[in-house]
Amino acid sequence: MASAPVVVQGFVDDRVITLLRVEPDAIRIRLDDNHSWRTAGAAIRTALGSALGEPDAWRPVDEGSADDVLRAAVDQVLSGEVGAFIRSHGGALTVVEVASGVVTVSLGGTCAHCPASDVTLTDRFEEAVRERFPALVGVRVDAAPSIAMGRRLLGLFPVSSHG
């Protein structure tokens, strides 16, 4: 997270703002789950407006390697809507490794045996990670061979609505 002018940094220090990312064409801000834009938005907008008048007060933070940045993007995705969606179905997605732009995950809970987990991984998880980290090489599942084989076999059978 960037180090911001005092007027904005106070919101970070007080954990009202959990993400503050300065990009070339935007400033991304995420609020803690206990705060909302309805209640804190006006004060944050006022502070941000003031802080933008102090460009020398902004300090970049060394983000580390590309894999460190990718890991942070993955953590952000899992702590947000995608993670909530997975947990709402009794599933779990655990990061096994982040290396060379590839995220390796394991699936647990109901995701471990769900034939739709591939859709969740590609249409939800991978897409959200790629939005935050466009250089993502890919996402792979570290699954037991029997689970991987079961998923492939399930894909071979047509779905019947006749029971």
Image (cartoon, helix red, strand yellow):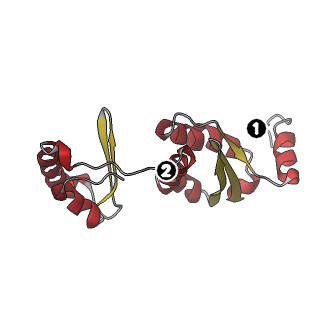
* Front residue (pair 95, 98): 98
Q: Residue furthest bottom?
A: 14
Q: Are marks 2 and 1 in contact (CB under 8 Å)?
A: no
Q: Would residue 149 be seen by someone viewing this image from the given angle?
A: yes
Residue designated by label 2: 64
* Front residue (pair 19, 52): 52
Residue 2 image position (x, y, % from top left): 32, 51
Q: Which mark is residue 27?
A: none
Residue 154 image position (x, y, % from top left): 83, 42
Q: Is residue 144 above or below residue 140?
A: below
Local crowd at mark 1 within 10 Å, few (<14), some, or many (≥20)? few
Three-letter code, disc 1: Ser
Local crowd at mark 2 within 10 Å, few (<14), some, or many (≥20)? few
Residue 123 image position (x, y, % from top left): 59, 37
Question: Which residue is painted at 37% across and 51% down in the image?
Answer: 61
Which secondary structure, mark 1? loop
Q: Is residue 142 left or right of residue 95?
A: right
Residue designated by label 1: 161
Mark 2 and mark 1: Cα distance apart in space: 52 Å
Tell me the quarter of the picture where residue 86 sits. bottom right
Question: Which residue is painted at 84% across and 40% down in the image?
Answer: 152
Residue 120 image position (x, y, % from top left): 62, 44
Three-letter code, disc 2: Gly
Q: Is residue 59 left or right of residue 70?
A: left
The image quadrant where one finds the C terminus is: top right
Question: Which residue is painted at 36% across and 61% down in the image?
Answer: 33
Say which label, 2 or 1, has the lower sequence index: 2
